[in-house]
Image: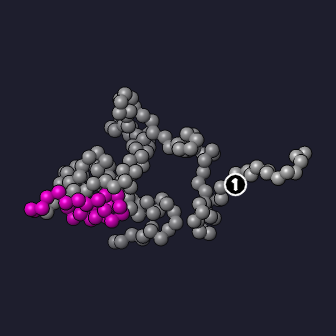
Amino acid sequence: MRHKSFDDMQCPIARSLERVGEWWSMLILRDALLGLTRFDQFQESLGIAPNMLTRRLSKLVEAGLLERRRYNDRPPRYEYVLTQAGRDFRPVLWAFVAWGNRHFAPEGPSVVIVDSKTGKKADPVLVDRTSGRPLVPPDFRSAAGPAANPQTRQRHPAAPQPKRRDTSNRPRP
């Protein structure tokens, strides 16, 4: 059964789910970020049926998250290498790690994020690159962007506009 396509929706979450929302896709990306590149490596790691793995890899290539590269001519063999978009998915997976550990690991975490130099456990948090402040409500919220359609503008109120400095020569009270 074919699911409804989210490609025509303006929502960035829906558009992202169109590319990675199927659970095998996220697990393939997880394994690719851990260094796996070959079909048999993915199949062994995931225990996924070959026809399903072929479909998922093709979709990830089509979505621009993986690139298919030939590494052997006879017989023809391919590897699947992360693109920049695929590498940019790492923080999303790390957020899943932190969320899953916090809410779904009663026995304790089986995977943690650590500082590569010190080995100290990290506590992933999403921050604003400009201010360095954590993206938590009420300090931050979603807002309609410049390309938003009326439905998106209704769902996400406009962002407050920055106050303008008065540059007139009028005397101030």
Residue 79 is situated, as x and y percent measured from the top left of the image, at 21, 56
Percent position of residue 154, x then y: 63, 64
The residue positioned 85% from the left and 51% from the top of the image is: 169
Type of the residue with mark 1:
Gln
On the rendered structure, is 1 left or right of 73?
right
10 horizontally vs 105: left or right: right
Q: Is residue 54 magenta?
A: yes
Q: Residue furthest front?
A: 169
Q: How many marks?
A: 1
Q: Is residue 74 above or below residue 28?
A: below
Which residue is at a point 50% across and 43% down the rendered structure image? 126
Residue 41 coordinates in the image, percent (x, y): 20, 51
Q: Quadrant of residue 62?
A: bottom left
* 152 in the magenta segment: no
**Left or right, 163 with reference to 31:** right
Q: What quarter of the picture does the C terminus occupy?
A: top right
Residue where numbered disc 1 is placed: 161
The image shows residue 138, relative to residue 25, as above or below, that is above
Q: Which residues are magenta?
A: 49-75
**Where does residue 42 sit, x and y in percent of width and height?**
23, 53
In screen coordinates, is 13 left or right of 155?
left
The secondary structure type at the circle numbered 1 is loop
